[in-house]
Amino acid sequence: MKREAFSSKIGLILAAAGSAVGLGNIWKFPYIAGENGGGAFLLIYLACVIVFGVPLIMMELYIGKRSRKSPYGAFRALSGSGRWQWLSWLCVLTAVLIMGFYFVVTGWCFSYLSEALIGGFRGMSTDTLAEHFTAVTANTPRMLVFSILPVLVTSAVAWFAINKGIERMSKLLMPMLLLIMLIMVIRVLMLEGSMSGLRFFLHADFSKITPDVFIQAMGQCFFSLSIGMGTLVTYGSYMPQEQSLSQASVQVVILDTLVAFLAGVIIFPAVFSFGFNPAEGPQLVFVVLPAIFEQMSFSWLSGVLFFLLLGIAAITSTISLMEVVVAFIGEATATTRHPLNRRTSVCIVTGIAVVLVVLCLLQQTAFSVFEQLTANYLMPLGALCMSVLVGWTLSRPDEAAYLNEKGFQPWMVKAFSFVLRWVVPAMILLVFLHGLNLF
Ligand code: TRP
């Protein structure tokens, strides 16, 4: 059977950028940057994205595009043996665990969107909003409804497969996301006092730059670009043959970084303009921002647009998460006596997602364990292993020849495989050791 592929280059770019752009960009990036030297952090982040982000995205897309398979078959095809099979299990395990907590956070966004729509934050101060956040997230029946809703939306997209599902949704949602961001940037920059917020975000304070900040920037780069769990391998397997790997990687990185940057441009001026504390950390999005919107003119519209933005960013990411597992099941059962078609796989994955969501809702521990384990250990580990595999595979001249796309010089292939073999593993080990608190 012929493998379905994205119908256009832009289809792949928007789908991959949709996976990368998520809560990590809008919620996490601004406050990490704000706390770690603003503009100075931004520069380091940019360096990380260029040195690791681009090669690692290119590596994952390459694995998929070359083998036309999702991680289950791709590592086998690339290494020529079953020795790397376990790596595909690692990818799918990571995807399943991320689904558990990511759907819950997506549920918070949906729940806040529904409240913003009915004007539910009217007259609330940050104190009431903080209590409100605790109460809402502890309300299990409500959260159950709002977390299972995005599971069903995601399943519906997966059901319609690549062109009619993922590609069509990405082409609809990503432009919407960028448009909403632009509207909000303009709105926020018109606020009085917005410039001091911008100054806080962009002022380069190099005194705050410690080795620790480098490592944080690197971790954020991996997480934000969805590297290390086979999402981009899977999407790469649907990549049009004529699309350039290097160009696609650069385009995805630019989009992801642009959204993170714009999120900072939206959040800090708003925070400063209304005299809130920018170091509110994780609470910023669900507690401080609704309070700010209440004080703005067009408060209803601002709140609705912002939570719609979060919801869209989250959904395009969950779509890619589910696709990893769906493609895996299809491929893993293809040669058995009971091959499962896409729709059966989608039903199975939906079931798994619901079980994990319920688990995360009932057990706060499950939520935190899944969150920490995936971002700090499983994703870097996956990236490390893939980079070693590809780095060494590329030493075969026939493989390297494959990368000689237009404008790609032979020395670039050499540099690419050097980065994958040595630089990336060394850096990931650093992040690991940091995660283990050995520094
Ligand atoms: N990149 C996503 C974000 O910025 C988070 C993420 C990490 C992710 N790995 C993923 C999303 C895999 C989808 C699939 O929020």
Image: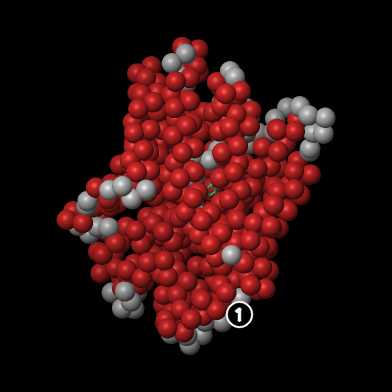
The amino acid type of the residue labelled 1 equals Ile
- Mark 1 nearby-residue class (10 Å; few <14, some 14–19, many ≥20): few
The residue located at (42%, 81%) in the rendering is 126
Q: Position of residue 262 (x, y in %)?
A: 39, 58
**Which of the 4 image quadrants contains residue 232?**
top right
Q: In this rendering, would 431 be left or right of 159?
A: left
The residue located at (47%, 13%) in the rendering is 396
Up/down of 203 relative to 15, above or below = below
Q: Residue furthest top?
A: 397
The residue located at (69%, 57%) in the rendering is 355
Secondary structure beneath label 1: loop
Question: Which one is in front, 14 or 134?
Answer: 134
Q: Is residue 311 among the parts visible in the rendering?
A: no
Residue carrying label 1: 118
Up/down of 51 relative to 206, above or below = above
Q: Position of residue 80 (x, y in %)?
A: 58, 18
Q: Position of residue 268 (x, y in %)?
A: 34, 67
Up/down of 395 relative to 296, above or below = above
